[in-house]
Structures are given as C-alpha cells and as structure tokens.
Image (cartoon, rainbow, N blue to C red):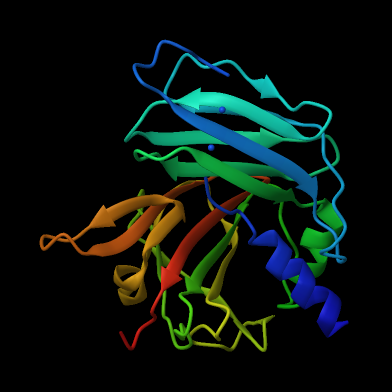
Amino acid sequence: MRAPLQLALAALLLAACEGPAPFCGGFEDPLAYELSLSKLSLNLDEFVPVAGELCVEQPTGCECVSTDEDGLIRVDAPRNTEILGEVHATGYVSTILVHRSDEVDRFTAMRVLDRATLTILGGTIGERIERTRGQLAMRISAAEGADVTGSVVTLRNLDTGEVVPSVYTQGRIPDPDATSSDDSGVVLGVNLVEGRYEAESAALGTCGVIDAGWPRYDASGRLRALEFVVRADRVTLIDALRCFGPGA
C-alpha cells in the first residue's frame, strides 16, 4: 500500500508552473495563462485529460472557461495581480487556485483528485475527510542539490488567529506524529474550517519560485509566509519551488 500512496501524494502536489485567449479581456498587455487538467492516477505515466472549467473570482467580472478536448484552458491574465479561482470537474474534488501573476507567461499542469483517493489519504492519518471542511496540500520543493528535510510550517487561520495542526510526511507517507517535513517538503492541512490562512516557514525565504499561494514578506523583504483560501469540500494547493531548506 505504501508505494501507491506515495505516488498519489506526489501526483496531488504536481501543480506546476508557466504560458494563452481571453477569459475576461480588457487587460492592458496581459499574460498568457494555460491550465492543463488531467486525472490523478497511481500510474504517473498515464495521462487522461479531464473535462472541466476554471472559474476566476479575482479579478472580478470573469467568465468560467471550459477545457478543450485535450483538457486545456487558455486565458489572458493581468500582470502582477493576486488571482483566485476554482477548478471544477465532474467526479472530482474541486481545487482552489491561488496564484500571484508576475511578468512571465504561465503554464500549470494540474492533476485533479477523485474523492476515493482523498479518502485514502485521510485514512493514512486516521482522519475522516469532512465535506464541511477544506483540505490543504503544500509542498516546499528542494532546489537541485538542496535538502528541505526538517522544514517546519505554521498554519494560521487569519480570521481567528488560531494555529491549526500541520501534518507532515515521513518516508513520503503522511505521519500524524511527525514534527517537520521529510525530504519531500510536503505539508498537509486536514479538515480546516473555511477562511483565509497563512502558511509560515523560515524555509520559504530560501525558495526561488512561488507557484501557488500569495506571497507575504517581512519588513526586510524576505518571504515569510504564503496566504491562501480554504473552502468546504475543496482542496487548496500551495507550491514553493527551488528551495534550499531550513539550513540555508
């Protein structure tokens, strides 16, 4: 059972990076933004396009845009803007997209998660996944030759100030007793109350790319946290890439 769960968790966190036809239009000098939807599979070599839609709430006034036959969505996006949306696909758990655009076109390959796989992942830490709560999957991904083992992440509900439990992996399997990350840099938040949250970690200041999450900086300009949104019966994906870890 360990190998399939490892693959499922790794695939869940493949919300990658960057590069495309207006969803709102009206943006001056917009970025090209392309999203590819495919099914989460225990066989990572398998690619099954998924029909779905991207509904952007922020910026406002945007229409929902559906995939083409290859599971692709091509839109225009404004530069240097916090973007919030949801990805919906029949038969899959909806995914919250939280991203800050910059000056570079973007392509994101997203694996959408069915409820059975989410239930299995919850079962590895003895939790029943509740539809009235939201779920978080975060990754602090190591740069080449670096090690993010030992990264500690504090999850804080910004609406209440409450610090909620962070679940790490050991041997790349969720472990409720772990107190910091293994070399995968994976952090989970399970059955979170709806609201706005921050994931704060000293390791984030070592990361070169923030692929998902709204960056928040300290007074010196160092990245200290990523802000995100949690909603009932949704999965929020947060991804920091090219990180050097807590020892940097």
Look at the image and tell me whether residue 165 can be seen: no
Horizontal placement of 56 versus 49: left or right?
left
Q: Which x, y percent locates residue 70?
A: 81, 34
Q: Which x, y percent locates residue 99?
A: 45, 43
Front residue of 241 and 132: 241
Give the total of numbered labels. Answer: 0
Look at the image and tell me whether residue 15 can be seen: yes
| Quadrant of image for the N terminus | bottom right
Horizontal placement of 40 versus 166: left or right?
right
Where residue 224 sits, quadrant-wise, is bottom left
Image height of 245 relative to 26, above or below: below
Where residue 49 sits, quadrant-wise, is top right
Residue at the top extreme of this rendering: 26
Residue at the left extreme of this rendering: 219
Horizontal placement of 3 versus 136: left or right?
right
| Quadrant of image for the C terminus | bottom left
Image height of 21 relative to 130, above or below: above
Front residue of 150 and 129: 150
Where residue 87 sits, quadrant-wise, is top right
Image height of 63 relative to 119, above or below: above
Q: Residue at x 73, y 41 (%)?
A: 37
Q: Residue at x 86, y 66 (%)?
A: 42
Horizontal placement of 178 versus 50: left or right?
left
Q: Which x, y percent locates residue 199?
A: 40, 63
Front residue of 175 and 218: 218
Q: Residue at x 58, y 54 (%)?
A: 16
